[in-house]
Image (cartoon, rainbow, N blue to C red):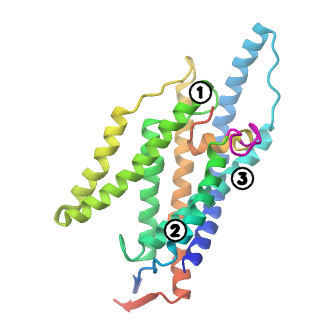
Amino acid sequence: MIRTLLVRGLLVGLAAGLIAAVFAYLVGEPHVNQAIALEEAASHAQAAAEHSHAEEELVSRSGQQAGLFLALALYGMAVGGIFALVYAGVRGRIGPRTDAALSGTMAATAFVAIVLVPFVKYPANPPAVGDPDTINGRTTYYLVMVAIGLLAVALAVAAARKVPEHRYLAGAVGFLAPVIAAWLLLPTVNEVPAGFPATLLWDFRLSSLGTQLVLWSAIGVLYGVAAERGVRRRSLAVTVPT
Amino acid sequence: MSELTTSHPVPLAGLGRWLLVAVPLLLLVAYLVTFDQGAVSQAGNYLHELMHDGRHLLGVPCH
């Protein structure tokens, strides 16, 4: 049974990743290309001043655009698989009682915890924004934010179960308290170069958030269908007339 | 919908084994896609460059 749910999670994740890649290619790539053009203009000016040569490209731009599909397909499979294993543990124990509602709720929760919570503090940056020397620190802060998002969900569920008469209020407090504390306490990162177009930054960030939203929406909808059919085939579901 | 599917919990026996095997593998894939700069893949910056656009648009820190 767990194997069925896991295999379906991997397949749904693959499909969702490819759907998100189409969105990213159509909506996000134009902004990535504009940012790279600005980056190259800046580095050419610098190279001309220093008489140095630009680094040779490991992967061409068209290779990177094909890599976008590969990256999102693999990322979709990885999160889809983990999603499925969590689903196997949660199903029938916590949350909504139908597969469609549980899958949608879990995907929405995952989007908030591991995408939206880190995004508000450390938003996505296009090429040309960000200092390569600080990448380790920024990666650590980002992962701390992801961990806090997940921890906050666990706290919210625990709080809501503890105080069932005010479960929405308890859940909201359990979620928001650690998240807001982390937003306030973790270091701020601002490495946007002077003169980088604000509209390009905004458009890029929206398209990045949109890519993740498409990914998780697709997982939530498709996995509900896939899990229900898989479970029905294994006759673990009991149908009752309403 | 005219019917309601009541969810009988999936038996937890065996889930631990799946978690031990599958989760590290899936996290490794996610790591290689989003963060590797050659430390694990031993491919230098190749994965970074190949996954470049995906990393930016997934929203993870990238150079």
Q: Which SS type dominates the magenta stretch? A: loop
Q: Which mark sits nearer the N-terminus, 3 or 1?
A: 3
Crowd class of label 2 (few under 14; some 14 to 19; many from 20; radius 10 Å): many
Q: Which residue is mark 3?
A: A70
User: Looking at the image, which residue sits at the far bottom?
Assistant: A241
Q: CA distance from mark 3 to mark 1?
A: 24 Å
Residue at point 45%, 77% (across, down): B12
Which numbered dot is residue A129? 1
Q: Amino acid at mark 1?
A: Val
Q: For this view, does A30 lie left or right of residue A82? A: right
Write down the region rendered in magenta.
B37-47
- Using the image, determine if residue A99 lies above or below residue A45: below
Rendering coords of residue A195 (x, y %): 57, 17
Q: Dot 3, crowdedness within 10 Å: few (<14), some or many (≥20)?
A: many
Check the residue under mark 3 and report the chain it is in: A
**What amino acid does circle 2 point to?**
Leu
Asked whether A141 or A55 is in front, the reply is A141
**Location of residue A11 in the rendering, given as x and y in whole percent from the top left corner:** 64, 68
Q: Nearer the viewer, mark 2 or mark 3?
A: 2
The answer to which of A217 and A4 lies nearer the viewer is A4
